[in-house]
Amino acid sequence: MNTLIKRFSVFAFIAVLCFISAIAEAKVTLPVFFSSNMVLQQKDNVPLWGTANADKEVKISTSWNTKSYTARSDNNGKWKISVSTPSYGGPYSITFDDGEVLTLSNILIGEVWICSGQSNMEMPLEGWGKIMNYKQEIAAANYPEIHLLQVQKNTSTTPLLDIKADGNGWQECSPNTIAGFSSVAYFFARNLYESKHIPIGVIHTSWGGTIAEAWTSGPSLKKMPEFAATVERMENDKDYEKNQEANYQKGIQSWNQALAVKDPGFKAGKAMWAEPGLDAASWKTMNLPTVWEKAGLADFDGLVWFRKKVTIPSGWEGKALTLSLGPVDDNDVTYFNGVEIGKTEGWDRPRTYIVPAGLVKKGDNYIAVRVFDGSGGGGIYGEPESLFLKDPAGEKISLAGNWNYRVALKIGEIPPLPVLASSGPNRPTVLYNAMINPLIPYAIKGAIWYQGESNADRAYQYRELFPLMISDWRKNWNRGNFPFYFVQLANYMKPDENPSESAWAELREAQTMTLSLPNTGIAVAIDIGEEKDIHPKNKQEVGRRLALIALANVYGEAVAWSGPLYKSSKTEGDKIRLSFTHTDKGLIAKGGNEVKGFAIAGADRKFYWAQAVIDGNEVVVSSPQVTNPVAVRYAWGNNPACNLYNGAELPASPFRTDKWEGITAGKK
């Protein structure tokens, strides 16, 4: 082949590549939430947007009305258009054509709800959640007209334009897709669907353990002085995260060194309590998996070592093994025969480590796990089937059962764990930027929210912050005062023996005060919490109560949707008479004739448990210890015994008649 022909062939090849590249670039690109299986809001002008080549005409065709629309991309390739939707129905399709055709199928027209918050909203049916009757609920979850969009966790100091989603988009609700989805979101959707038989789309975007300010935009947060400086630094310092990350890594290194010095399990920097030859006869035993608070370490936070002897068959010797521990709360370092094989931070992350072949011998082998827990539950707490050793052929040895354990250090003996200010979800704006902003202005009907636990110690601040967040979302979505319904914190922790102050009670009060915003509603959960679990299992009732609010206020059904809410009080000698709204079919003391949960105080502000008598739609409260009462509180505590309901068997919201300064006042 001569030189001229060779050159021509090269040029021709390049030309073909350029042509192919041009075709590839010409294809319309959509955000991940515009996908097959999506649900679009009915009877609306629904925004659609995406990218194409610059200054390119994009034709959009909708099958439900056989209409065609035309959009033109700007100099940056961005385009946006609105299409009209009919009453609910489907399935339909949409095609996008800018020279190449992209078709989305199995689109339903119905009702779209955003579902957000922290872990009680995130809590899946199975996974780490294991809600009540989860196996039966998963098996029964055949609802092809309920579609799910699971937003993946992400953070950003600047507003993003797209998300990542499980399954790369919307999915039909089925036993194969529901197990890892938000249980509250699912039960809310299921109740709406079973009542209205309208397709329901639920967009779940939440993150356990997070604070409300992380879900609020920068421009709104700057209205609160305590957040303004941080938001401005994020906006103005391009190296903010990089600098903070470097400082954090130095801090973590120093913390680990200091911890190793204090930890009796180490000697001269070596993990002696992980060594195969250690005599652990004096160690106690614990049946794993479990949170250690339920197994002899009540109210314990700190550092605990676990050990287990495992007998390895001769056929496994010299082979790399898989070690599964399931989730560990909070952080672990794991050893096999004295050698570190892995470590993980995060209370909800399953642990799976590879045991190097050179460490595996026939006969007795030793696994050691060093667990640090900073607060709440601790330990190796998953399901029994998640604890195992596995060989390359798939044969397993169960590790569930008795392990030796020994407490190394209590939390007060451990140096404070460094906090990465520039990483993680608990920073102002970062979840709004990454997990809410990209969804705007997707057409929605409303939002449900379950959060507050992480803001409880700043409950007075939440009085301003939470309404600010709701107003922020509404303003940025530009869909008016769309419905925003939220769950009040459930009862949790040790039952209250005597009337006492409570940050959680003050947070519930802040949530109730947020009802002053239009088109809001509260699902009271003071009766369905659990003493030892911040994640109560009865998410079915939470979803039902949220759905009742929507059914009554959005869909016009004549159903009771709220429990009694305190309205006013009047002093009558040595008694105080209380009146309520939402007394549907009359007030009742559920479970008996005695009304529980009321406390009364005089001017000295000392509260005593009170006698409470239902009088029609009112309650009369008194105590022989308070002859001149001035204040009443109901269900005011972390885990109060209370039983005031209305005739629809919806619980009364906790409240107080006084305005005395609480324990979280002034905390920022």
Image (cartoon, helix red, strand yellow):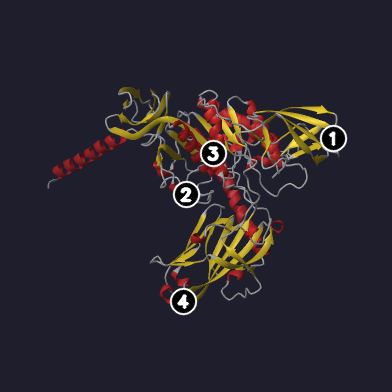
Q: Is residue 540 above or below residue 398?
A: above
**Residue 222 in the image: x percent, y percent?**
62, 30
Residue 509 versus residue 191: which sits nearer the camera? Answer: 191
Q: Nearer the viewer, mark 2 or mark 1?
A: 2
Q: CA distance from mark 4 to mark 2?
A: 42 Å
Residue 265 position, x and y percent, is: 64, 67
Q: Earlier in the sequence, mark 4 or mark 3?
A: 4
Residue placed under numbered mark 1 in the picture: 602
Determine whether, in the image, residue 281 is placed left or right of residue 656.
left
Instruction: Residue 52: tell me if it is visible.
Output: yes
Residue matched to label 4: 362
Gap between marks 2 and 3 measured at Cα? 17 Å
Q: Is residue 482 left or right of residue 657?
A: left
- Dot 2 or dot 1: first in sequence order is 2
Asked whether the residues under the numbered discs 4 and 2 touch, taking CB atoms below 8 Å apart as contact, a structural biologist would say no
On the image, the x and y values in percent for residue 218 come to 58, 32
Q: Nearer the N terminus, badge 1 or badge 4?
A: 4
Task: Give the vertical position of 262 relative to 647 (above or below).
Answer: below
Tell me the crowding category of disc 4: few under 14, some 14 to 19, or many 20 or more residues within 10 angstroms, Cα based.
Answer: some
Name the kind of residue labelled 3 in the image.
Gly
Mark 4 vs mark 2, foreground winner is 2
Question: For mark 2, what is the residue?
Answer: 136
Q: Is residue 665 visible?
A: no
